[in-house]
Image (cartoon, rainbow, N blue to C red):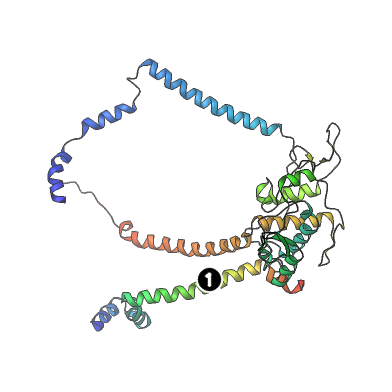
Amino acid sequence: MAATVSRICGAGLLKSASTPSITQISSYSTRDWSRSRKALLGSLGVLAGGAGALLFALDKSVKASELELHPPKNPWNHNGPFSSLDHASIRRGYEVYKQVCAACHSMRFIAYRNLVGVSHTEDEAKAEAEEQMITDGPDESGNFFQRPGKLSDYFPNPYPNEEAARAANNGAFPPDLSYIVSARHGGEDYIFSLLTGYCDAPAGIVLREGQYYNPYFPGGAISMAQALFNEVIEYSDGTPATASQLAKDVATFLKWTAEPEHDDRKKMLIKSIGIFTILIALTYYIKRFKWTVIKSRKIEFRPKK
Amino acid sequence: MNLLTGLQFSKQFPKKMGFQQTVYNLVFKRTSTMALACVASVFFFERTFDLGSEYFFDKINEGKLWKHIKDKSQ
């Protein structure tokens, strides 16, 4: 087969292939284009570039017009490349969420079973779940009924639907908090600053009924009232419940809910650094080993006399 | 045959005769034993490597992980 192919094409392959390649090259050249064709393509290019630049400038100007305070970077003790979340803080943060935030904010993607081995033992998590009444059903007669929660239940929603939530909060919808840390610029720093950053509105800012002023919230007018005050709840582990401690703990808890894989990811980093160190060293050695023949070779040119 | 390669080997590397030669003859010479050795060593390497990196992680995060605070909360 191969022999036949080479017999047929062989002669052709040996021929100089100058004619087709020259025509191919000439199609990339603009030398013999007509004047109008050049003008058309040129103006199209300028138009496209201009439109892109305009969009970029508009985007920039929109961002510049926003008057908002960016949250400062806080020294979280999970900031390091190998640092895990502080699980005592997650546990306290859960208490804050349950007693303060859960009144308005849902957390649809976290189940009680997720707490096991993170902030609660299995028995504690079961007890937490049983405190909540969950709507289940339909039963044999087609009715929905209430039952105490199980480990497999997700955190209950404070409102039956979004419309009910809006109606109860002046038309503002309290966002679901499951992934809020990943969903906001600044992450846990933003959450912390927002919760502790309430202040009186500066002169000239008009707030409508049911709005509060928070410089960290885009636009400044937020429909959530300040929720965290000193001693607003009592921690079960006896930590003094100052407003900033509450905010820090709930921000850590929300960081965990947004990134439940956080600790495993950092453990994986340690493992991959170890494995790749070994592999890189091995690759370097093998490369040197295989190339010794070539690197130690000497090629000499001796012209004929 | 064995004797012959052994002889040649020992001529080439007269000092490294004993242990390396035995390992070569028992493990590396045959593909079957080599593959078996790979599988066995991977098992032990993986266990030690995992335990080592987990120990490192726990040391860095002493007092922050659930297993460290589990007994305190009870």
Placement of A297 over or under A125, stated as above or below: above
Q: Is A202 or B13 nearer to us in this picture?
A: A202
Q: Position of residue A5 (x, y in %)?
A: 15, 46
Can residue A305 be seen from the camera position used here? Answer: no
Q: Residue at x 66, y 52 (%)?
A: A179
Q: Residue at x 53, y 71 (%)?
A: B49
Residue A294 figure quarter: bottom left
Q: Position of residue A79 (x, y in %)?
A: 67, 56
Placement of B22 over or under A86, stated as above or below: below
Q: Position of residue B37 (x, y in %)?
A: 39, 76
Residue A156 figure quarter: bottom right
Label 1: element kind = helix
The residue identified by callout 1 is: B49
Q: Residue at x 54, y 25 (%)?
A: A50
Placement of B71 over or under A242, stated as above or below: below
Count of all numbered marks drawn on residues in the image: 1
Q: Is A143 or A235 nearer to us in this picture?
A: A143
Residue A67 figure quarter: top right
Can residue A256 be seen from the camera position used here? Answer: yes
Q: Is residue B37 left or right of residue A150?
A: left
* Disc 1 packing (10 Å; few <14; some 14–19; many ≥20): some
Dot 1: chain letter: B
Q: Position of residue A82 (x, y in %)?
A: 62, 61
